[in-house]
Amino acid sequence: MIRIANGQGFWGDWLEAPVRLVEQGPIDYLILDYLAEVTMSIVQKQKQADPSMGYARDFPPLIGRIAAKMKERRVRVVANAGGVNPIACAREVKRLAPHLKVAVVLGDDVYDRVDDFLARGLELKNLDTGEPLADIRSSISSANAYIGAFPLAEALATGADVVIAGRSTDTALALGPMVHEFGWRADQFDLLAAGTIAGHIVECGAQCTGGNCIADWQTIPDFANIGYPIIEAEADGSFVITKHRGTGGRVSQETVKEQLLYELGDPRNYITPDCVADFTTVRLADDGADRVRVSGIKGRPATPYLKVSISYLYGYKATGTIVYSWPDALEKAKAADGIVRARLLALGLEFEEIYSEYFGANACHGIAAPAAAQPAEVMLRVGVRGKDKKAVDRFTRELIPLVLNGPPTGTGYGDGRPPVREVVAYWPALIPREEIHTRVEVVA
Amino acid sequence: MRVPLSRIAHGRSGDKGDTSNIGIIAYDSRHFGVLVREVTAERVKARFGPLIEGRVERFELENLGALNFLCYGALGGGGTLSLRIDAQGKTMAAGLLGMEIDIDESELTD
């Protein structure tokens, strides 16, 4: 049995979680999931500004902080912290933890190959809309293929203490150590599916140990010291989800089921670079306090394609808010919204979308929200999105004047006019897997 | 009798681009049939009205006593494009769990 713990569900997750996982009990692998689709474009921009950047900056200091404990307890780290510059990330880790062996997985970054792909007739059509990539070629800011567990296992085979990948899938971070430890082969699809689903359960950190849990949330103990998840993985593909003793939170069939359903598409066809996993085959059983046993998982061969995540500059947006107090808070907010829209129209400004929400009334659920007879206050939030930066900038000046020249009791404008933000959008596409060649390098 | 769906089920919601995924899970797996009967794709679509621009697709996970709904065009463009506060549809499950369902008193096992 090996213990694989996830200490980071996204870049920005709780900084103490990975430290506690290493210190508060036994684990063999610490995995850290840093990358979301949008993250890649952010790190790409950072690299363009400074060629030594372009990775999850929180990662090297974390390794510096836990390096001694890692050696003492023989904990190895697997992280997709590399962003678009895994080697720079690895060098910084080596600087802060010189006695650790660090390996990187390269080959996911295809930003410099896009023109070559297009020239050879690989259209990289948008998976959602079917549009060809050529339409937005000039706006692309990053392009990365999702890589699976086998390159990570290959990196672990070098004996590295720390394995840094770029755009590996979240689930591969858990499956990679299993492939390495148990010697699973690329055609053992049930085993690969089991490791993939284990990875899915822990990929969002504490979201499977009581965090964001709707079931009985008031009774979940000690959120302040919530334990992050640990997979106790067996060579036969069965595993237990648990957390360190004495930590807060809860592991139950309810907490695990909620996470199984999270961001799930067709449950029979969970497609990864390693296999297609079938969530309808998952069997759960109680296995003592804060332990859930998972077994029975089936999988099928992977598809001939890898997913490519491309980011591109889409346009601009801004959102601003004003608060109105009772009486008639919602009516005032709606009147203010009408005034803003009339003024934008009079200015001849065009936007792709103007969207208004009423916080305290129905912003989250629309018509599904329960009616509030007389809300104490309502916050109007108006957003615009468009290709024309100047028009979006002009919009940001139209909210605050309402405090003086619109309905009464407008307040809460203290932060001034809202900033204009670049909209970097995400373009999912497929590429034949033989186009992507990963390689492992040990960084000296 | 009519009870809120939250009486027999919990859930979690998230996003895949502009698609909101809503997972609804029976506390007692014996209520899976009630979920299948009461929480149809049509009712989910109607529940949220204009928030869901596209269709709603339902998948069954009897092994977990759960249903998974994919609500297309439900997140105002999704990801970074969305102008909605709940651009990732994090609260959609809670919104659906407030829906009233019909259930026989004999079916309520608690």
Image (tube, coloured by chain):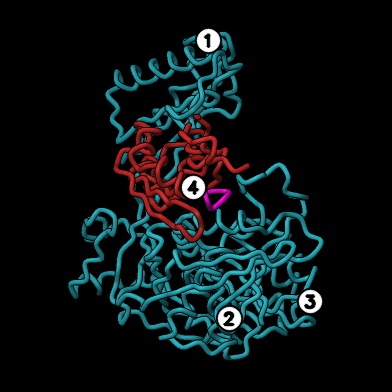
Chain colours: A cyan, B red
Q: Residues under labels 2 and 4: Cα distance?
A: 32 Å
Span colored in magenta: B23-30
Residue hosting label 2: A177
Residue A355 is at least partly visible in this image: yes
Q: Nearer the viewer, mark 2 or mark 3?
A: 2
Q: Quadrant of the C terminus of chain A?
A: bottom right
| Mark closer to the chain start, 1 or 3 | 3
Q: Residues under labels 2 and 1: Cα distance?
A: 59 Å
Question: In the figure, B41 relative to A193: above or below?
Answer: above
Q: Residues under labels 4 and 1: Cα distance?
A: 36 Å
Which residue does the image show at 32% across and 75% down from the upper left? A303
Q: Residue furthest front?
A: B106
The answer to if B26 sits in the magenta stretch is yes
- Disc 1: CA contacts within 10 A as few (<14), some (14-19) or many (>=20): some
| Mark closer to the chain start, 2 or 1 | 2
Residue hosting label 4: B24
Image x and y of residue A54, in percent: 51, 65
Q: Give the image quarter of residue A412.
A: top right
Residue hosting label 3: A69
Q: Chain of mark 3?
A: A
| Mark closer to the chain start, 2 or 3 | 3
Q: Are marks 2 and 3 in contact (CB under 8 Å)?
A: no
What's the residue type where badge 2 is placed?
Pro
Residue hosting label 1: A328
Q: Are marks 2 and 4 in contact (CB under 8 Å)?
A: no
Query: Helix, strand or loop at disc 3?
Result: helix
